[in-house]
């Protein structure tokens, strides 16, 4: 298992900015979950515990799971309400998670929730749109997120004042989860369903969203697929870290009793 943790930042951004179709991603670790994680949306690791936001579509319930290093469930925390039961992509600002809890339809509404590990989720403000993912721009920064499928980008103050908004002109993938990088970017991961000669298929990718301009500065394919489900690895949550001279991207593409999969690629030269 990979246990070494570091703060990510410019080296992650520089490595993703240098990635291309030919970049090699090597599977270096996998952690089977020993419980039904339903439909995961966001993911981050804090002090050795994995935190996963997910939606139970059958019970129409939003949840945040705490998972230990063995893949066992150690926390199960309801989040959202009867209408806003779709928690999205999330990130940790050093003290708390910021989690969007939305209605399960596009162009709807959401409640932005703040959650400190060991405490209870607390609603902070409402948004007149489905918010699919959100991250805080550092421990003292604003919040940046996007609508269903990352079609619209937003920036808010932490008390909910809308600071800027921008339509996403890109059609590469619908980004699902994000992570703040101290380069001024959000690392994003997502998926798109595409039509191929043999029928429907998946396109996966990662990218860098400039938090100030709300512009995707880089998007590259992530051509790794799950043998059983056929899903691309970036189908839902992601979280990254630097381990020695490698960028590690952790992913949880499958629903239910899934695997947290860890893929590595070398850091680019000069990415310090």
Image (cartoon, rainbow, N blue to C red):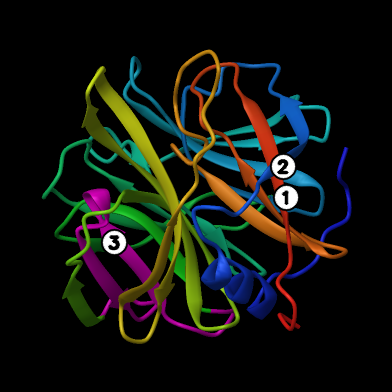
Q: Which mark is residue 264?
A: 1
What's drawn in magenta, residue-wise?
A: 138-161
Coordinates of residue 103 in the picture (x, y in percent): 22, 40
Q: CA distance from mark 3 to mark 1?
A: 27 Å
Q: Is residue 272 left or right of residue 254?
A: right
Which quadrant: the N terminus?
Answer: top right
Dot 1: few (<14), some (14–19), or many (≥20) neighbours within 10 Å?
Answer: many
Identify the mark nearer the N-term, 1 or 2. 2
The residue that label 3 is drawn on is 146
**Whole-percent x, y for residue 146 in the image:** 29, 61
Q: Residues within 10 Å of mark 3 (few under 14, many from 20)?
A: many
Q: What residue is at 64 percent from the left and 69 percent from the top?
A: 12
Under circle 1, the secondary element is strand
Marks 1 and 2: CB-CB under 8 Å?
Answer: yes
- Residue 103 circle label: none
- The C terminus sits in image quarter: bottom right
């Amino acid at each position: 298992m990979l246990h070494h943790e570091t703060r990510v930042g410019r080296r992650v951004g520089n490595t993703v900015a240098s990635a291309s179709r030919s970049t090699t991603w090597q599977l270096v670790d996998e952690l089977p979950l020993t419980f039904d994680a339903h439909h995961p949306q966001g993911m981050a690791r804090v002090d050795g515990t994995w935190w996963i936001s997910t939606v139970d579509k059958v019970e129409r319930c939003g949840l945040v799971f705490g998972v230990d290093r063995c893949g066992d469930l150690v926390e199960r925390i309801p989040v959202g309400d009867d209408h806003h039961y779709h928690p999205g992509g999330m990130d940790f600002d050093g003290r708390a998670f910021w989690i969007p809890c939305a209605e399960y339809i596009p162009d709807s509404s959401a409640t932005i929730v703040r959650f400190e590990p060991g405490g209870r989720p607390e609603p902070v403000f409402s948004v007149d749109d489905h918010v699919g993912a959100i991250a805080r721009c550092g421990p003292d920064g604003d919040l940046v997120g996007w609508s269903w499928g990352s079609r619209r980008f937003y920036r808010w103050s932490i008390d909910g004042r809308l600071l800027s908004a921008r339509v996403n002109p890109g059609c590469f993938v619908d980004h699902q989860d994000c992570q703040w990088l101290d380069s001024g970017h959000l690392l994003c991961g997502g998926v798109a369903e595409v039509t191929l000669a043999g029928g429907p298929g998946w396109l996966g990718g990662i990218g860098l969203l400039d938090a100030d301009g709300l512009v995707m500065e880089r998007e590259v394919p992530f051509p790794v697929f799950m043998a059983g489900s056929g899903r691309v690895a970036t189908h839902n949550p992601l979280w990254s870290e630097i381990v020695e001279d490698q960028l590690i991207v952790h992913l949880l593409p499958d629903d239910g009793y899934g695997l947290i999969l860890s893929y590595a690629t070398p850091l680019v030269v000069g990415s310090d």
